[in-house]
Image (tube, rainbow, N blue to C red):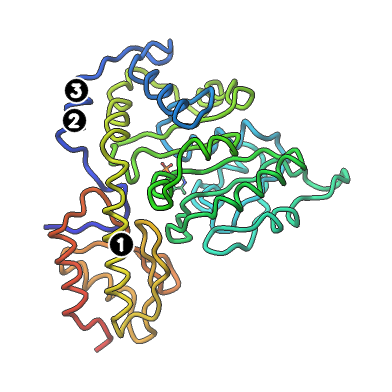
Amino acid sequence: MIIDLRSDTVTKPTKGMLDAMFSAKVGDDVFREDPTVNELEECLAKMFGKPKALFFPSGSMANQTALKLHTNPGDQVICDKYAHIYNYEAGGASFNSGLSCKLIDGNRGMFTANQVIEAINPSEYYYSQTRLVEVENTTNKGGGACWNFEELKKIRTVCEENELGYHLDGARLWNALVAKNESAKQYGDIFDSISVCLSKGLGCPIGSVLIGDEDIMKNAIRVRKIFGGNMRQVGYLAAAALFALDNNVERLADDHKKAKEIEAELSNLSFIKKVEPVETNIVIFELQPNVDETSFVNQLKENNIYIIGMGGRKLRIVTHLDYTNEMHDKLLSVFRKNDFTNK
Ligand SMILES: *Cc1c(COP(=O)(O)O)cnc(C)c1O
């Protein structure tokens, strides 16, 4: 039994999902004739109360397309220093759209409306023009933290007053919706564009969707084509997404419960210095100085447990669909029974 907690992307399609995929009706999506892709896009647009949605092979491509649609080369996007678009999209913001990022020094990947106001450049011609505010919910590098919706609304007002676009990287928005009992529609009401992932907590093999207003989305398909993202009979993949939306959203509460239990266990262990507060399915913790990070990870590996280091003695555990009760019991007992301090 391998217990893989490196990410919620390691899940494999279940029998039910595979059945849905293999029985999908498909067509050539370049001609916009794949009925299952069309159904998925309509379903998500409706769920968020937006006119348009477009299926993408990856979350990065969906975010990068959004950045391109909101900006012109030389513009600036405001985001947190932990933002995925800044840290983990291979410099795409500058490569694809000629943007610079104005980084906010936030708290666990989140910031305030006042910090946004301070980050907006003056209008003099020698400044880069601030064009877009980008937020992430839940925050990845911030340890699965959920935004306060009231703050997101305040930032919306700042965006309106300053004619800035407002994009949500909602790769793990599903986790926030479940954890905070919020609706997709309320996010659709305040953001101009939203990307969501289907291959993270929801258990699909691939797929993200960009959802947005008409004016933003009208060129989305052109930009996706430029980025090499034209696809053909991908109704097979959209069918997995439709299955996941029906079956795998509410159950995220179970991933959150297990993550909470891991947090409680780790908080009691002498070789752990600090566990960041767990809100969803991500547990970030820091080792005591007398525990070597590499040997800690290796010792877990010897017990068939895989987790990843985030640098700076911090490690990350992510719970997911394929992490069973049996694995959970084993993980907790391995932590309880082993001495991980340097010998
Ligand atoms: C995973 C993730 C993405 C998208 O990543 P891809 O690997 O390109 O699908 C985007 N934003 C956040 C916050 C993520 O965690």
Q: Mark 2 points at which residue?
A: 18
Real-space CA distance between mark 1 and mark 2, rounded to the nearest whole angstrom: 27 Å
Q: Which of marks 1 and 2 is nearer the N terminus?
A: 2
Given this view, does label 1 or label 2 mark the residue nearer the observer? 1
Q: Which residue is drawn at 32% across and 62% down?
A: 317
- Find residue 49 and report its horizontal and vertical position in percent: 51, 28
Is residue 170 in view?
yes
Whether residues under marks 1 and 2 lie with C-beta atoms below 8 angstroms apart, the answer is: no
Q: Residue 22 carries which label?
A: 3
- The amino acid beneath tag 1 is Ala
Whether residues under marks 2 and 3 lie with C-beta atoms below 8 angstroms apart, the answer is: yes
Mark 2 crowdedness (10 Å alpha carbons): few <14, some 14-19, many ≥20: some
In the image, taking residue 7 as reference, residue 225 lies left or right, namely: right
- The amino acid beneath tag 2 is Leu
Q: In this view, does 244 lie above or below 146?
A: above
Mark 3 crowdedness (10 Å alpha carbons): few <14, some 14-19, many ≥20: few
Is residue 96 in view?
no
Number of marks drawn? 3
Real-space CA distance between mark 2 and mark 3, rounded to the nearest whole angstrom: 6 Å
Given this view, does label 3 or label 1 mark the residue nearer the observer? 1
Q: Mark 1 points at which residue?
A: 259
Mark 1 crowdedness (10 Å alpha carbons): few <14, some 14-19, many ≥20: many
Whether residues under marks 3 and 1 lie with C-beta atoms below 8 angstroms apart, the answer is: no
- Find residue 46 and report its horizontal and vertical position in percent: 46, 26
Quadrant in which the C terminus appears: bottom left
Q: Earlier in the sequence, mark 3 or mark 1?
A: 3
Q: Which residue is drawn at 39% across and 16% down?
A: 29
Furthest-bottom residue in view? 343
